[in-house]
Image (tube, rainbow, N blue to C red):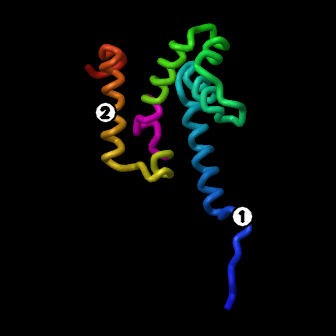
Amino acid sequence: MLYYYQTGPDPAWLQEQEDIRQNLLALVERLPGQLGFIMVSYYGLKGEEAQTFQAIGKQLGCSGEWVRQLHQAALVWLRQPAHSQELRHLLARHNQAQYELADELAQAWLRRRGGQNGRH
């Protein structure tokens, strides 16, 4: 009888994780204005230590609260299927229910902002 011992992570799984990471970075780089910088800094997406909203605000010359609000705007942008189709496909979140959830979250965010930047 032959036994198979795997000494490390599955190469196919590692490649899939790298594809997801690269797709996410490419998506974040498409964010408008300072939103990409905020996301990279807050989550440490390029290998550096994650930073707080206050620390990022200090670098940008604004308040931590403003950075938090911009972070929320970035999440809304990133969730939009038109922006994130390839990443959604890689994560198996490429379905109607996920699109409806993204729209619900975006509409809730817009209502909290008083209907600015989109549909009312």
- Quarter of the picture containing the C terminus is top left
In front: label 1 or label 2: 1
Residue on which the image places disc 1: 8
Residue 85 part of the magenta-drawn span: yes
Query: Where residue 20 sits: x, y (%)?
Result: 57, 48
Secondary structure, mark 1, is loop
Query: Where residue 101 sits: x, y (%)?
Result: 33, 39
Q: Is residue 26 left or right of residue 110?
A: right
The residue shown at (65%, 32%) is 44
Secondary structure, mark 2, is helix
Residue 35 part of the magenta-drawn span: no
Q: Amino acid at mark 1?
A: Gly
Secondary structure mostly seen in the magenta stretch: helix
The residue shown at (63%, 8%) is 61
Query: Where residue 109 sits: x, y (%)?
Result: 36, 23
Q: Amino acid at mark 2?
A: Glu
Q: Nearer the viewer, residue 117 or 40?
A: 40
The residue shown at (65%, 11%) is 58
Q: Is residue 101 left or right of residue 3?
A: left
- Quarter of the picture containing the N terminus is bottom right
The residue shown at (68%, 62%) is 9
Q: Residue furthest bottom?
A: 1
Residue on which the image places disc 2: 104
Asked if residue 4 is positioned above or below residue 117 in the image, the reply reads: below
Q: Give the mark nearest the N terminus, 1 or 2.
A: 1
Q: Which residues are magenta?
A: 77-86
